[in-house]
Image (cartoon, grey):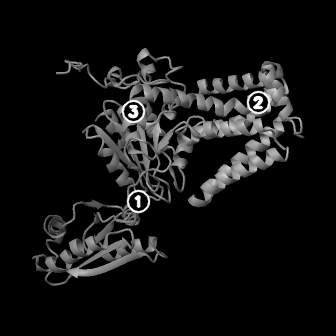
Amino acid sequence: MSFFEELFSKKKEDPRGKIPVEKDYEKNLESIKEILKGTDDVVYREFKVGQQQKMSFATIFVDGLADKDLLNENVLKSLMLLARMADLDLHNLRQKIYEVIKDGTISVSDLREVEDINEAVDNILSGETVLILDKWEKIVIIATKKWPSRSVSEPSTETVIRGAREGFTETMRMNTALVRRRIRDPKFSIKQMQIGRRSKTDIAVMYIEGIVNKPVLKMVKERLDLIDIDTIMESGYIEQLIEDEWRSPFPQLQHTQRPDVVAAALYEGRVAILIDNTPFALVAPATITTLLQSPEDYYERFFIASAVRGLRYLSILIALILPALYIAVTSYHPGMLPTALALYVAGSRNNVPFPAFLEAFLMEGALELLREAGIRLPAPIGATIGIVGGLVLGQAAVEAGVVSPLMVIVVALTAMAAYASPSYSFAIAFRLLRFILMASAAVFGLYGVILSLLMVITHLCNLKSFGVPYMSPYTASSTTFNDFKDAFIRVHLRFMKKRPQYLHQEDNIRMKTPKNDIKKEDDV
């Protein structure tokens, strides 16, 4: 047994215990009805088969989760009509009935047996159909899942100019197919499990054997096994329960709606987690470089991607410290400004009745309020409220003398810089820390800003995501020069021949040197 098979071979024990399937058809049926009592959407269809009509069968499924057309045409019709002509009797039923059903009666691609009533009930609630046979100590599970689902569309939270327009949906099996389409490697593995005592939410752990970081994969599996909760409603539940440091404001797993981002992460040796009922996938480990990268960084030419990526790093710094710098300079260090600018700032604040900190806090708070209101309102109204509210509020505040014109410019630049981050969760962390830096600047001036920045940087350097330093490759001990080719800048693809080595993959060769490099030929 390989490392990966051994890792996922152990299953959690069902806390409800095991209820064995009995030979008595009526007892099995009553046991399932007792467990599912009060659920009116469960359909019980009892009938008899065989030439003498002496064999009792029953199918059980949930209306709305099972494919009725498939069930009627390929299961019930076959059993009730075709099986009547089969020469079966109670004497050879035990030995022959399942073989007849599997090989010559039910034309369904996936059939299997279970010996536990609770397991059969879980399959019913997952959209499968169970078939109970008289005098048979097993229950047949027929694959009939089919429920309402949203079609594949472009993800709204990760738009790109150039790249695929496919995004994950709320159906996990459709999401695994979108990733499988991009990774046609037989070593690409999808290991499925269920988490949630009551919800029984399907979870898929994806990795590429031979590339994946083994310690990270083992850590992911162990942390998922430790989760004991009644329900998993969204990927955020899993993210909060398996992250390294829950007290940190920074996300330690990357979440994405794009299958191409997940596929690229798997090719780097990382691990992806898909959760049913949510279009967001989780990728571990996450580092500051992966959270600031966009898919189209690799679809555009390298110098364009490098310039845009550098702009993102600058925008994060602006979103974090610009309001704090305004407070520190205007309140404690006006001498740092050129004379003309210092006089203009002092003149613009001449009629403002509030100190710089309160002025900045009010404007930043109003901006966050507008941002939240714009998200919660319907899309057409939300965009209008954001634009009109920002313009009207800013103009009115300046004319009323509540804030200075320069403060409005600082808040607008800060808002634009915060939106430049590809990761929403990563940008939110800096938005929260911005208020802490503003308070430090109000008390200690520029020294408070520098002290707060040092604390943030220290925290980021100590933070880890599944054992991988969060600031990789900048602080990882195993970092090589090759890792910096796809960090602050991105070099040409022909020079990115190795995968990031701080992830410790088994196979870190991404591309081999071509024997005949492409050369420019003279025009004829």
Asked if residue 67 lies left or right of residue 221, the reply is left
Q: Nearer the viewer, residue 163 or 224?
A: 163
Q: Which mark is residue 326?
A: 2
**Residue 445 visible to the viewer:** no
Q: What element carries label 2?
A: helix
Q: Residue at x 43, y 15 (%)?
A: 481
Which tag, 3 or 1, sits closer to the chain's start? 1
Q: In this view, does 133 lie above or below 170?
A: below
Q: Which residue is drawn at 85% across and 35% down?
A: 349
Q: Is mark 3 on a helix, strand or loop?
A: loop
Distance in Å between CA atoms under marks 3 and 1: 56 Å
Q: Residue 286 carries which label?
A: none
Identified by mark 1, the residue type is Lys
Picture quadrant of residue 179: top left
Residue 295: horizontal and vertical position, in percent? 42, 37
Q: In the displayed orientation, state which residue is furthest to the front.
A: 524
Identified by mark 2, the residue type is Tyr
Residue 209: horizontal and vertical position, in percent? 31, 34
**Residue 75 visible to the viewer:** yes
Q: Mark 3 points at which residue?
A: 300
Distance in Å between CA atoms under marks 2 and 1: 66 Å
